Amino acid sequence: MDLAKTDSLFIFLLLAAFVIEHTSKSRISLMISGLTYSLAYMTKQTALPVLVLYAPISLIISNGKSLMIWVSFIVSVVVSIVGLNFLSGGWFVFYTHSNIASHSIAPDLFVFPRKFVRTA
């Protein structure tokens, strides 16, 4: 079932935060948008490059009015990471950041099939 996958939830949260951001009329709704962006990040950490690219664009386009979004995003992500890392005894950062950063990418993706597929 596709609803159980984190990709769908990540896309939903990212789009919901974007819609909240662009329809917001108050500071509270801007904070809710930032919290929704942080939920998207906590759902799938690959949201970080998207948000790092989008944040300055959002700040430039809105003439700094979206600063509340990104402050609430950063604060909520830092508090979440520190809290989850404390509750897990350090395992949260290991599994979500350290472990992933130590993985290497194969230089040639075609080496694997050539080794195991016989050619006549």
Image (cartoon, helix red, strand yellow):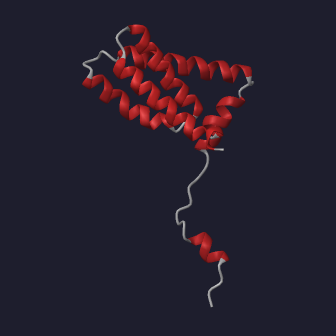
Q: Is residue 101 left or right of residue 26?
A: right
- Front-most of residues 90 and 116: 116
- Residue in the picture at 43% in, 8% down: 28
Vertical order, 4 against 65 (above or below): below
Figure disc tally? 0
State the quadrant of the C terminus: bottom right
Vertical order, 89 against 117 (above or below): above
Vertical order, 106 against 92 (above or below): below
Vertical order, 58 against 113 (above or below): above
Q: Is residue 66 left or right of residue 83?
A: left
Where residue 18 appears, x then y in whole percent? 40, 27
- Residue in the picture at 58% in, 71% down: 111
Where residue 105 appears, x then y in whole percent? 56, 55
Q: Is residue 98 left or right of residue 15?
A: right
- Front-most of residues 16 and 70: 16
Residue 21's quadrant in the figure? Answer: top left
Residue 30's quadrant in the figure? Answer: top left
- Front-most of residues 8 and 50: 8
State the quadrant of the N terminus: top right
- Residue in the picture at 54% in, 35% down: 10
- Residue in the picture at 52% in, 39% down: 46
Q: Is residue 30 left or right of residue 47?
A: left
- Determine the residue located farthest toward the bottom in the rendered image: 120
Where residue 107 appears, x then y in whole percent? 52, 62
Where residue 68 appears, x then y in whole percent? 39, 13
